[in-house]
Image (tube, rainbow, N blue to C red):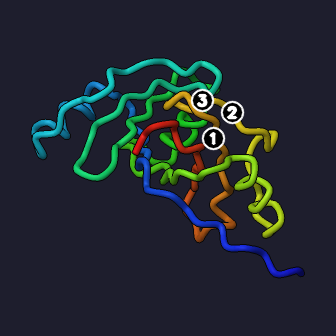
């Protein structure tokens, strides 16, 4: 295998948390931690989920609720009825270069392998947890002017 240049991950953008109810999760984070919703819930039908964001000091929590039985989150919640950490998301400078680097390094990019539009309105890919120490990793194109 040829020498690969290092893929430098950008900042941790968010931690995805699957939940049976975004409203109940927001109430819990508010009651326990004083957190407030920064982005109201909205549907992402192409991904089968409803999402909302809570800002924390240096990142965000993405609350993810299934839109129906076909949602990938529905399957997660069958195994974890109370919900739980679903994925971590890192920013990358170039999503296509990141995807290609993942493939070159033997990691499985989920779905078709083509980036799809994520909750922040930028392209994303997911890397299979069997290749990342059991953690589902989302890589997202760094939003323009975000930092």
Q: Which residue is mark 1?
A: 124
Residue 26 placed where, x, y %? 24, 32
In the picture, the disc for residue 71 is 3
Please state which of the two labelled residues, at mark 3 or mark 1, is closer to the viewer.
1
Residue placed most toward the observer, 7 or 22:
7
Label 2 secondary element: strand
Query: Are the residues at dot 1 and dot 2 in contact (C-beta closer than 8 Å)?
Result: yes
Residue 105 placed where, x, y %? 78, 69
Dividing the picture into quadrants, the one containing residue 53 is top left
Q: Which residue is mark 2?
A: 116
10 Å crowding of disc 2: few (<14), some (14-19), many (20+) = some
Taking 79 as reference, is 40 above or below it?
A: above
In the picture, the disc for residue 140 is none
Residue placed most toward the observer, 4 or 124:
4
Label 3 secondary element: loop
Quarter of the figure with the C terminus: top left
Quarter of the figure with the N terminus: bottom right
Residue 70 placed where, x, y %? 64, 26
């Amino acid at each position: 295998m040829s020498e690969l240049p290092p893929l430098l991950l950008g900042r941790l953008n968010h931690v995805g948390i699957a939940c049976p109810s975004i409203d109940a999760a927001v109430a819990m984070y508010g009651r326990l931690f004083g957190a407030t919703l920064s982005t109201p819930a909205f549907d992402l039908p192409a991904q089968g989920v409803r999402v909302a964001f809570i800002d924390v000091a240096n990142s965000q929590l993405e609350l993810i609720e299934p839109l129906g039985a076909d949602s990938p989150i529905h399957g997660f919640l069958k195994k974890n009825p109370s919900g739980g950490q679903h994925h971590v998301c890192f920013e990358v400078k170039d999503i296509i270069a990141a995807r290609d680097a993942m493939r070159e390094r033997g990691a499985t990019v989920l779905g078709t392998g083509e980036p799809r539009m994520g909750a922040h309105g930028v392209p994303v890919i997911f890397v299979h947890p069997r290749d990342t120490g059991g953690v589902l990793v989302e890589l997202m194109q760094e939003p323009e002017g975000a930092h």
